[in-house]
Image (cartoon, helix red, strand yellow):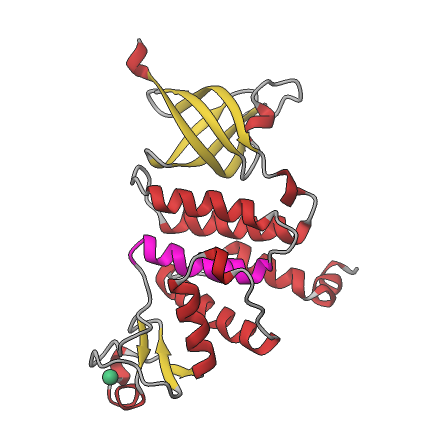
Amino acid sequence: MRERLYRVQAIVLKRTDIGEADRLLTLYTPERGKLRAVAKGARKTKSRKSGHVELFTHCALQIAKGKQIDIITQADTLDAHIALRDNLDRVSYAYYLAELVDQFVEEAVENVELFDLLKFALAWLGERNTDPGLLARYFELQLLTHVGYRPQLFACVNCGKPVEPIENFFSAEAGGVLDPACATTTREHARDAQPLALGALKILRYLQTREWATVRVVRLNADEQSAVEMLMYRYIAHHLERNLKSVAFLRELRQPTVTYERGAP
Ligand SMILES: [Zn+2]
């Protein structure tokens, strides 16, 4: 019987209600990558498991292998990320980070670096002096590296020459930066190429290659922020071939008037 049970550390990426009182959880683990398991009775308020399997909670689980789906038999909280829970803005960023991981990884593919990135990012998100937008951009670039979609920012993706410190172009389709000459000659492989200002390129490179401890003190102005955000949004949407739900949610949050009009009778 013993090999039917296994223990994992996990972060709860997603939960779906099933049946009367159960929850289906999508979990991210360092040892087994993404996996799904049922928390039986998790929606009963007196359930011993319920508090340990909240969204974004880092927990230690004992799981029993099932014929169709695995079942959580024990749960303990390692970090509930309390600090980010009382702030809707930060919680919606946490949704976004979790959804990015969920969308970019296949089940049962081990990726310890990505697990650690998510674990640390959720902790950083709860810190008062963290700029959540900056953290989201940092997370995107680091995640893309860990899952094999690292955008090329140092050499032209077409000719391989080092990128000059001038205005260049960026193409999600081509996978990174194109120099001005190649941007005009490779139209068919880079239909989405758009001008990339030198300032935005420097920010992207900084976020891609530095540790968060260094990046965290950077303060972007509104133009830099929206340029980098739009570029990352297009790059990620291109590679996922669809828009993430939580991106739409974050956008709505920033436009309260739009949300209000929609909600009005
Ligand atoms: Zn080139």
Magenta stretch bounds: 131-148
Quarter occupied by residue 54: top right
Residue 18 in view (yes/no): no
Q: On the image, which quarter does residue 257 sit in?
A: bottom right
Q: Nearer the viewer, residue 178 or 161?
A: 161
**136 within the magenta span:** yes
Q: Magenta-highlighted stretch: main secondary structure?
A: helix
Q: Residue at x 45, y 36 (%)?
A: 26
Where residue 61 appears, x then y in whole percent? 45, 24
Quadrant of image for the C terminus: bottom right
Q: Residue at x 40, y 21 (%)?
A: 63
Q: Is residue 73 above or below residue 103?
A: above
Image quarter (top left, top right, bottom left or bottom right) of the N terminus: top left
Residue furthest top as drawn: 1
Work out which residue is located at the far front of the displayed protein and give it. Answer: 214
Q: Percent from the top left, x then y, of residue 13?
A: 48, 41
The residue shown at (43%, 70%) is 204
- Pick the residue in front: 155 or 107: 155
Q: Is residue 213 magenta?
A: no
Q: Is residue 15 placed above or below 177 in the rendered structure?
A: above
